[in-house]
Image (spheres, rainbow, N blue to C red):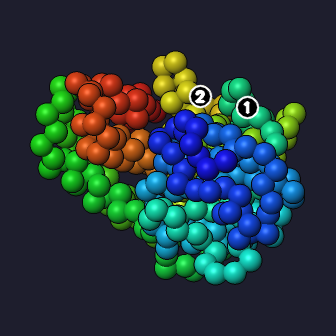
Amino acid sequence: MTSDQYWPKERFGLDFPKFLQQYGLQARGEPVPLTGGEDNRLARIPTDRGEVVIREYLHSGRAKVGAEVSLLEHLARDGFPTPMPIFPKAGERVALVGGNPIVVFPFVSGRVPEAMTEALAGQCGALLARMHVSTEGWADERIPVVDRRGILEQAAASDVKLAGAQFWRSETRGFLERNAAALGLLGELPSGPLHHDLHRQNVLVDGDAVTAVLDFDELNRGPLILDLARWCHYAALEQDDMRLPAALVEAAVAGYQSVRPLTGAELKMLPLALDLAGIVDAAGFVMWAAPYLGLESISECRSWKAYLANCDS
């Protein structure tokens, strides 16, 4: 039970029984790898207090994970459907093993929904609004702020050699120039902590009801409307033509507004926020991931294709 078996993304460097004792837990079986997370290692293991999930963060630092844990504790106590972290009996709330932060969560049953339906879209919108209302005024300097304009400026000036890079740089530069004033206004909208990664595979359902919202690893602070925009971007990526169906947008926005009415300025800025979500996601992928994946063309970036499919809608 010491991680000698195969694990996705290499192995946990843990003696699981000994590690869990720090949390007042007794291991009652072998750990099982959980797949799906891109930026973490996950192990599910039975204990004397039920099954738990041990999550090792591969790219986030201890301070940022600490901010996430504090936020999750608050949300869970406020009735938001996300697992409450399990804390050790003594010492730091976020463990550090081999240089990586580790947090223990209770295992939550449920299934990943097979498709994004209008009903599920409405629930996702409402859940984002519940999070935003619950964390209104939340102040934690450990939560990062993403410089989206800076990422696009870096992309426009980059020397990426992929096919189609010249058009990609030109369009990125044009986006910044066309929307300079609007991007400035975006920063004046209501802001707070963002989940920033709410897509179908980060929710669990039981029947028609969402039982858990997972994976807050992209937690950052910014205009609240960007959480809806990111949800829209992910929903578009699941379409064959990558065009976002109006019915899904209407359902998500209606669900959101049933909990937290959007201001007129937020509604007006939603199309720009969708474009921003897509073009920033594409810029990060092209600059920082594509070189290691053997891509040959910008057209292989799905976020870029989704941006182009929706930027005129």
Q: Is residue 128 visible?
A: no
Q: Secondary structure at mark 2?
A: loop
Q: Is residue 59 above or below residue 271?
A: below
Residue at 67%, 47% in the rendered image: 1
As shown in the figure, which amino acid type bears the numbered disc 1?
Pro
Q: Position of residue 310 (x, y in %)?
A: 44, 32
- The residue singled out by tag 2 in the image is 245
Foreground of the two, 211 or 185: 211
Q: Position of residue 139 (x, y in %)?
A: 57, 80
Q: Secondary structure at mark 1?
A: loop
Q: Position of residue 234 (x, y in %)?
A: 54, 37
As shown in the figure, which amino acid type bears the numbered disc 2?
Pro
Residue 296 is drawn in which quadrant? Answer: top left
Q: Is residue 75 above or below residue 43?
A: below
- The residue singled out by tag 1 in the image is 113
Foreground of the two, 60 or 222: 60
Residue 60 located left or right of residue 154: right
Residue at 39%, 44% in the rendered image: 281
Foreground of the two, 29 or 42: 29
Q: Position of residue 295 (x, y in %)?
A: 27, 27
Upstream in the sequence, badge 1 or badge 2?
1
Nearer to us of marks 1 and 2 is 1
